[in-house]
């Protein structure tokens, strides 16, 4: 079976588009081949700045014959319907067969297509792929109609096997197609022909092109690491930048340069951000001091001076960029020296947070009020939490954060320290934004936790107060992320906080902000959001986020529902402890069998209550019990009830589960030896009440009827 080699040679493809383009090329071509009956063994796609490549091995040389039976209209259908069916099937009237159907006799067309050679199919599939390629942005050039991300210069398309290679002629505007390509833009020797994928990759490497992006990235990282290690330094890891730089070069040449002493006083994060965003440089750090002392850049060619001229040019541009950063830094420090962080934060009065919720300064006051209430719950001093909350957003008014928004919080920490704040306040300025995602670290310092919770709760309650909730996949204000942030802050720090109380406070504070906006002639025309509804709806939103969070930890949604139905479901730590213990219990044999016993008792009880039209919630009496199995169940329920109550009160869910586990044997024995629906009505009623007691005792731990089993 032959192998397919396809290369699309063009002007430079943006690095951010290359990985997706590889996946799309592989998907479109292979799916097109399979749809036409051409199967294959394996496929791999590659990208460099100037080319997309696809290698497909084990391609079927000839597609099998295809036979399709297509059912048409009834034989007595209108002529127009029959004629339309003939056109669609591509057959003549006399070629139709008549068959019996449940609706009468119908026409059936037998469509037979002979198998086609792989070359013919490949040519069609490649042309269709190029015509419909899903680039995020594309352009037309010249006189052709093809839209591509950058001008496409040539197509290399081969089917090759042990006999030899054959060009697959792809006809696409006036773009040449053959068995040739080019190497490096500057170091290559011109066009050359290839005969296979192995020949192609080998010749590309001789022409100073590394085809595999992972190989280019590995080369960059190893060279940079070795250069830094030789000088007692380390390269700051940046996987995103590494992938981007690997997409900018075909032949990476790693160079290390110096940073002028003028900039050594800048915070390391400023240096790193400026070099990454503006120059695509890697930062090189002194592990002893933590300072960024050098940089690594990656050139796309080898030079006779070993990159000296390239480094000199880069250092000149870097000097100008870092001079700007130094100016911002020093100017911000002068501002803080004269008016402090509180004075810098005052300018947030002129920054609108949301037209219905007031300015950033007004929001800061709401966060401070919430942080003051939350602080005792997390072991923080209320006055320090309020202090941190009032300056946490001050750096948004700084020149540095205006230039580099990704440094918000980080600069807040530096500026707060420069202004003389301490006792965890500077750290809270940085950490209150966290966690930003499921893999981000969660703050643990009490003041940081208090301000982080207040910040996120204010965001959520504010938008709930104006009825701006996420809908479907749309979440413009990142409210799902904020809710998950609250959940992780609470759970990771084991914060015993009643959410309803704090959500109520947040809603009320935000309603006052809305009313204030209305009094100024801004915002909503009326404050018409019901606070009770908003709190209940927001708590439900938290529970939905919690389900997603716990599902990733292996706890089923029905188990969470069973625990959500219990009192105190706004205490997330209590809720998760209950759900975790229940999940672990149900994974045991005792738990699984006890659940089945509960289901049996609940089903019998529900059916009989429906049939009789009465509730069997009365207290069963031991004097009506018959036989040892029934009496044993009475005794076991008494024991379990006496143990479960104190265990739940003490939040010892493991003990509660252990007490429930002891019910398994007596419940099994009861159903084995006792007939519930006996003819004796007094006995029957007593036994149904006993089943209700099983439900009542077990429901003190969780709502077992909500567990699917």
Image: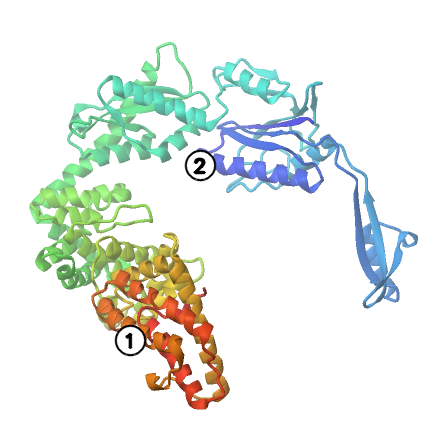
Looking at the image, residue 167 lies above or below residue 496: above
Residue with the most extreme top position: 304
Helix, strand or loop under label 1: helix
Determine whether, in the image, residue 288 is placed left or right of residue 250. left
Quadrant where the image shows the N terminus: top right
In which image quadrant can residue 548 be found? Answer: bottom left
Judging from the image, what secondary structure is the residue with disc 2 in? Answer: helix
Q: Quadrant of the C terminus?
A: bottom left
Tell me residue 146's x, y (percent).
62, 37
Q: Which residue is mark 2?
A: 16
Q: CA distance from mark 1 to mark 2?
A: 67 Å
Q: Is residue 611 left or right of residue 685?
A: right
Residue 517, can we see it? no
| Quarter of the image where one finds residue 71 | bottom right
Q: Quadrant of residue 27?
A: top right
| Residue situated in front as seen by the camera: 321 or 511 | 511
Query: Which residue is pictured at 40% across the width and 82% down the height?
Result: 626
Q: Nearer the viewer, mark 1 or mark 2?
A: 1
In the rendered image of this protein, does residue 389 appear above or below residue 59? below
Tell me which residue sits at (12%, 46%) in the image.
416
What label sits on residue 638 in the rendered view? 1
> In the image, 78: left or right of 182?
right
Q: Is residue 511 above or below residue 310?
A: below
Count of numbered badges drawn on the protein: 2
Q: Position of residue 259 (x, y in %)?
A: 22, 24
Q: Residue at x 54, y 20 (%)?
A: 201
Depth check: 420 or 206 in front? 206
Q: Residues within 10 Å of mark 2 (few under 14, many from 20)?
A: few
User: First in sequence: mark 1 or mark 2?
Assistant: 2
Give residue 325's position: percent from left, percent from top. Answer: 22, 35
Q: Are marks 1 and 2 in contact (CB under 8 Å)?
A: no
Whether 346 is drawn above or below 306: the answer is below
């Amino acid at each position: 079976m032959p192998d397919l080699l396809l290369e699309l040679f063009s002007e430079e493809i943006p690095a951010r588009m290359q990985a997706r383009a590889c996946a799309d090329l592989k998907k479109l071509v292979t799916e097109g081949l399979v749809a036409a009956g051409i199967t294959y063994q394996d496929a791999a796609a590659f990208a460099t700045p100037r080319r997309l490549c696809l290698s497909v091995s084990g391609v079927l040389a000839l597609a099998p014959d295809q036979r399709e039976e297509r059912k048409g209209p009834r034989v007595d259908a209108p002529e127009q319907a029959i004629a339309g069916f003939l056109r669609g099937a591509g057959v003549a009237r006399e070629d139709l067969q008549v068959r019996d159907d449940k609706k009468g006799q119908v026409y059936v067309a037998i469509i037979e297509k002979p198998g086609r050679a792989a070359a013919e199919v490949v040519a069609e599939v490649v042309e269709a792929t190029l015509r419909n390629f899903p680039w995020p942005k594309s352009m037309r050039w010249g006189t052709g109609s093809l839209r591509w991300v950058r001008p496409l210069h040539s197509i290399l398309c081969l089917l090759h096997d042990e006999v030899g290679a054959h060009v697959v002629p792809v006809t696409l505007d006036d773009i040449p197609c053959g068995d040739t390509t080019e190497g490096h833009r500057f170091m290559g020797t011109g066009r050359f022909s290839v005969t296979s994928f192995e020949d192609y990759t080998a010749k590309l490497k001789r022409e100073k092109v590394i085809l595999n992006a992972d190989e280019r990235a590995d080369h960059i990282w190893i060279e940079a690491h070795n250069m830094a290690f030789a000088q007692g330094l380390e390269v700051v890891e940046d996987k995103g930048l590494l992938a981007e730089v690997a997409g900018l070069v075909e032949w990476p040449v790693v160079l290390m340069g110096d940073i002028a002493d003028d900039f050594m006083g800048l915070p390391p994060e400023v240096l790193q951000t400026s070099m990454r965003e503006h120059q695509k440089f890697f930062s090189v750090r002194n592990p002893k001091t933590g300072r960024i002392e050098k940089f690594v850049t990656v050139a796309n060619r080898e030079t006779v001076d070993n990159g000296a001229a390239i480094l000199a040019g880069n250092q000149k541009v870097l000097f100008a960029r870092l001079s700007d950063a130094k100016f911002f830094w020093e100017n911000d420090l002068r501002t803080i020296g004269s008016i402090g962080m509180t004075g810098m934060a005052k300018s947030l009065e002129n920054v609108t947070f949301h037209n219905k919720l007031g300015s950033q300064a007004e929001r800061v006051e709401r966060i401070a009020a919430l942080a003051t209430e939350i602080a005792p719950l997390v072991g923080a001093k209320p006055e320090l939490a309020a202090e941190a909350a009032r300056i946490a957003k001050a750096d948004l008014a700084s020149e540095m954060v205006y230039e580099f928004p990704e440094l918000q919080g980080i600069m807040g920490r530096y500026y707060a320290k420069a202004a003389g704040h301490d006792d965890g306040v500077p750290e809270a300025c940085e950490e209150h934004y966290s966690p930003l995602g499921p893999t981000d670290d969660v703050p643990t310092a009490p003041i940081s936790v208090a301000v982080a919770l207040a910040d996120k709760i204010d965001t959520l309650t504010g938008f709930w107060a104006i009825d701006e909730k996420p809908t479907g996949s749309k979440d413009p204000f990142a409210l799902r992320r904020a809710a998950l942030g609250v959940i992780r802050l609470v759970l990771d720090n084991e914060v015993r906080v009643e959410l309803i109380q704090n959500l109520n406070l947040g809603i009320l504070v935000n309603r006052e902000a809305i009313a204030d906006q209305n009094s100024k002639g801004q915002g909503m025309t009326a404050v018409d959001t019901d606070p009770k509804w908003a709190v209940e709806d927001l708590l439900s939103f938290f529970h939905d986020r919690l389900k997603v969070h716990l599902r990733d930890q292996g706890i089923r949604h029905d188990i969470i529902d069973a625990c959500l139905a219990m009192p105190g479901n706004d205490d997330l730590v209590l809720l998760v402890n209950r759900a975790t213990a229940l999940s672990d219990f149900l994974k045991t044999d005792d738990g699984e069998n006890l659940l089945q016993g509960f289901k049996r008792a609940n089903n019998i009880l529900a059916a009989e209550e429906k049939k009789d039209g009465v509730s069997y919630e009365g207290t069963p009496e031991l004097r009506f019990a018959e036989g040892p199995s029934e009496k044993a169940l009475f005794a076991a329920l008494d024991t379990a009830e006496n143990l479960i109550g104190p265990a739940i009160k003490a939040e010892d869910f493991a003990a509660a589960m252990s007490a429930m586990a002891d019910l398994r044997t007596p419940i099994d024995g009861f159903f084995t030896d006792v007939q519930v629906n006996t003819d004796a009505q007094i006995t029957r009623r007593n036994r149904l009440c006993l089943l209700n007691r099983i439900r009542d005792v077990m429901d003190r731990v969780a709502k077992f009827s909500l567990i699917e089993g």
